[in-house]
Image (tube, helix red, strand yellow):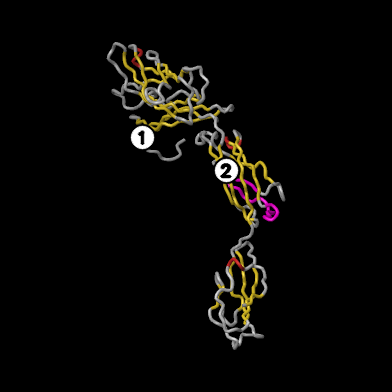
Amino acid sequence: MLKRQVTLHEGHKVFSVDAWDSSGKKHTVSVRVERVHHHHEDHHMDTVMNISSPQMESPADDLVLMFPKSSTGLKRAKRGWVIPPFNVLENGRGPFPEKLVLIKSDYSKEATMQYRITGEGADLEPKGTFTIERLSGNLFVTRPLDREKKASYRLVVHATGVDINIAEAPMEIIVYVMDQNDNKPVFTQNPFNGNVPEAAEIGHEFMTVTATDADDQESTDNGVISYSIVKQDPELPKPNLFTINSVTGGIRVNALGLERETFSRYTVLITATDRAGEGYSSTGTAVITVTGKSEKIMYKDGSDPDDWLSVNVMIKVKRPTHRESPFVKDGKNTAIILTVDDGNPPATGTGTLVNPGQDLGIHSVCKDSSVDPSPSPDVKK
């Protein structure tokens, strides 16, 4: 069915249709769509024709590729004009040489023809992978193919007459190497290391594991990886504290109960399985460290009626204080300092700074690293 308007710039379009039977074997057929003008009607009509025999993953014994016929006097293509690619399954067991296809010239009905091939796998590297019988036109593969090394080959077939001056125009054919699931997933590192705050909420994603697979993941599931968690060590306080996104490998918090003081580190065993979880598996490890509450502390001015302090990263005196200040009570000038960290929820505390009323300033009372966010005793100077 035509899904949208299409412009056939070359007057035709060729594509392949794949189907898999119940045993998993792939079948491929090439289809050509062309625009044909009917002179007895005042309109054009799109026609669809099958331009090749249905192909198995390994070509059938009776599959024949014909050279295009001469275009003299012809206005449009015939079935043999576009040579569809054919597929060869990788890791073939032979025996070799193994026949792939018979290539014929129409001239062979009138004269003896001889055939030769050039291109990738013929006279170019990897040389000798494909050969052709000079007089019969039978095309052979001489060794097992490996899709991970080379996924396709472009060959050019030449046909000339024997003892007669006739020759076909060179014909290009493409051999696609079909993938087998012959590679396991490989983790990009092992172990993976990640940190998770003990106060993290359920669903918080804090690290990602990744694996690769050399097999095809575009037209098959052979290289499509699915991740899963096999085991968590220790399995305390719960055995399922973490979960993993099967597609992305992102690890998330699955349950509450992380306590750095009790269990500061977890080792999680992970599998990566190809064929979307139904093929070969590899194992990897994620080492998860539970981190405590943040140590970053901020100070705030709680109560400084005499306005003698500057409260920021450090607590400093803005101006000297005097015994005669009306804010001196019982001979002391007192200020309240509030502290808060960046935890979730934040922890807070209170500290007291006391000046005994001397005519002296305080240059630096306390720093970020020296104040505990819990209530502190009086600091006197």
Q: Which mark is residue 247?
A: 2
- Give the quadrant of the C terminus: bottom right
Q: Which is in the foreground here, disc 2 or disc 1?
A: 2
Q: Is residue 114 left or right of residue 364?
A: left
Q: Using the image, determine if residue 380 lies above or below residue 370.
A: below
Q: Measured along the vertical axis of the image, is residue 227 above or below residue 72? A: below
Left or right of 26 on screen, residue 293: right
Residue 117 within the segment the image draws in magenta: no
Q: Horizontal and vertical percent for residue 7?
A: 37, 38
Q: Position of residue 101 (x, y in %)?
A: 44, 19
Considering depth in this image, is 337 or 59 the residue closer to the camera? Answer: 337
Answer with mark 2 or mark 1, whichever residue precedes in sequence. 1
Is 29 drawn above or below residue 330 in the view shown? above
Please give the range of residues in magenta: 242-263
Say which of 29 and 172 sits in front: 172
Between 282 and 320, the one lying in front of the other is 320
Query: Counting other residues with Cα less than 10 Å from the Cα at mark 1, is it few (<14), some (14-19), or many (20 or more)?
Result: few
Q: Which residue was labeled with disc 1?
A: 43
Query: How many numbered marks appear?
Result: 2
Q: Secondary structure at mark 1?
A: loop
Q: What amino acid is at disc 2?
A: Val
Q: Is residue 65 left or right of residue 282?
A: left
Residue neighbourhood size for the residue with mark 2, other residues' Cα within 10 Å, grouped as few (<14), some (14–19), many (≥20): some
For the stretch drawn in magenta, the main secondary structure is loop
Observer able to see residue 123: yes
Question: Hey, what amino acid is under mark 1?
Answer: His
Q: Quadrant of residue 362?
A: bottom right
Residue furthest left in the image: 165
Residue 10 is drawn in which quadrant? Answer: top left
Q: Secondary structure at mark 2?
A: loop
The tag on residue 183 is none
